[in-house]
Image (cartoon, rainbow, N blue to C red):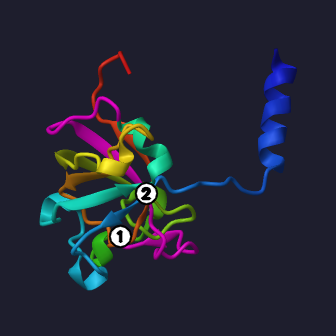
Amino acid sequence: MRGCVGERLNHVRRMNSYMLEPIGFIRSTVKGREDAPRQGPEGGPDAWIEIEARFADALLGMEVGHELIVITWLHEAKRDVLKNHPRSDESRPLTGVFYTRSPARPNPLGLHPVTVREIDPPSREDYGVTGGIRRIKIGPIEAFDGTPVVDIKSASTRADG
């Protein structure tokens, strides 16, 4: 048994990178850092996620009011920062980024707890091709316009999904 675990760990260590493919993109009034609150609940606006058509069926069952975790790739974040002062407040102790919510980190994934506000009905050409849903309005979210979305997960703790 131990050999199997060791083999898997060695295999993982040999891998240099992993590929993430965006499933969609954020469309928001937040255009850059100057527009963004530190966290969504601190004044983040509602925004749309435009889902790539080939992933539209993955939204099946989603309804207005559902709580989600939207996982984004913070494409404008610095990737070489390992320590910082939380909230850029020099009076706070220097802290490793793994213990902060800073966007600057080796793999800049953003985790955004949001609520589904609206689901666009499918356009006429979508019928018969996919489930048809291509845009969902969510919020609040502090992500910049154009931020890649790499996954969406239910925030529910139910065991059925």
Disc tally is: 2
Is residue 145 or residue 88 the one in the foreground? Answer: 145
Relative placement, left or right, of 71 versus 69 is right
Q: What range of the chain is rendered magenta?
A: 60-85
Give the crowd class for mark 2: few <14, some 14-19, many >=20 residues within 10 Å. many
**Residue located beneath label 2 in the image:** 24
**Residue 127 at x, y percent in the picture:** 36, 41
The mark that comes first in sequence, 2 or 1, is 2
Give the crowd class for mark 1: few <14, some 14-19, many >=20 residues within 10 Å. few
Is residue 49 or residue 1 the one in the foreground? Answer: 49
In this rendering, is residue 79 above or below 123?
below
Q: Secondary structure at mark 2?
A: strand
Of circles 2 and 1, the one toward us is 2
**Residue located beneath label 1 in the image:** 93
Question: Residue drawn 86% across and 31% down?
Answer: 7
In this rendering, is residue 115 above or below 38?
above
Question: Residue drawn 47% across and 44% down?
Answer: 55
Q: Quadrant of residue 59?
A: top left
User: Where is the N terminus found, in terms of image quarters?
Assistant: top right
In this rendering, is residue 14 above or below 27?
above
Q: Quadrant of residue 38?
A: bottom left
